[in-house]
Image: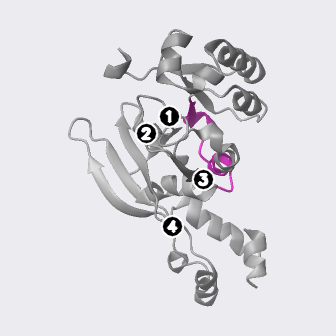
Amino acid sequence: MQKFVEDAGIEKFRAKQIMDWIYKKGVLSFAEMTNIPKQAREKLAGSVAIGGLGLVKKLDSKLDGTEKYLLRTFDGFLIETVKIHGSKGLTICLSSQIGCPLKCRFCATGGMGFKRDLEASEILEQVLLFKKDPKNDISSLVLMGMGEPLLNYYNVMKAVKLLNSKDGMNFGIRRITLSTCGLPNEIRKLAKEELDLNLSVSLNAPNDSVRNELMPINRKFPIKELMKAIDYYIQNTRRRVTFGVCFDKRSE
Ligand code: SF4
């Protein structure tokens, strides 16, 4: 950010002000950054836009108040972000890819094929959309929306580190959960990141034959191999790993 403002001929210290507006206040327009001189704001707005997601539709669940946001990316794809009101506060469920190549049988995203990875900025923006409204007191974030986060490792890590950074959103790392279908190589890589985030593995089956059926990735990485990677993760991070089960009529 410092390089960006300096390149635009603006004082270096403005970088922190811009970071604070975006990440602490959820302001995504230079025009609203009132402690920055008007001329500088206009110059910045003329050279770059903040954020590229547009709201297409919002669906509210009558059952539990869950809100689903359908968002359009700058290149015309659609992604979903979900706001969940739970007993422990507000959780935002984030997408990490447009579609998903892993084709889990119970998953609508898996059925739509893979379009592309989301940029780190697009992952972050799904959180920032809710930041501006003080009523949205976000207690946790889960990477459990569209896509397999560990297949978009670089951008997901970049987004998580910015969410957690003091210069970014300063959001507690232990309030962030990454949910994966279980990719052993990436789980080992994650173990070395020295990030205390929560890891949740979507297991969904008690044995390989059922899991092969539900989650084709299991044919490549059977449960035994996945468990070895999880052991490695636990030994290296001293963190607990949770296992997820998706209830679906087809898996009965
Ligand atoms: S990895 Fe996740 S997003 Fe991808 S198909 Fe499986 S459940 Fe769906």
Query: Is residue 170 within the magenta segment?
Result: yes
Q: In terms of sequence position, does the residue under pointer 2 or pointer 1 come before the other?
A: 1
Which dot marks residue 169? 3
Q: Is mark 1 within 8 Å of ligand 1?
A: yes
Q: How is the image coloured?
A: one colour
Q: Residue at x 42, y 49 (%)?
A: 80
Question: Which quadrant would residue 63 be assigned to in this image?
Answer: top left
Q: In terms of sequence position, does the residue under pointer 4 or pointer 2 come before the other?
A: 4
The nearer-to-camera label among 1 and 4 is: 1
Q: Is mark 3 within 8 Å of ligand 1?
A: no
Real-space Cα distance between discs 3 and 1? 33 Å
Which dot marks residue 74? 4
Give the magenta-colored segment's residue range.
159-180
- CB contact under 8 Å: marks 2 and 1: yes
The nearer-to-camera label among 4 and 2 is: 2
Q: Which residue is mark 2?
A: 111
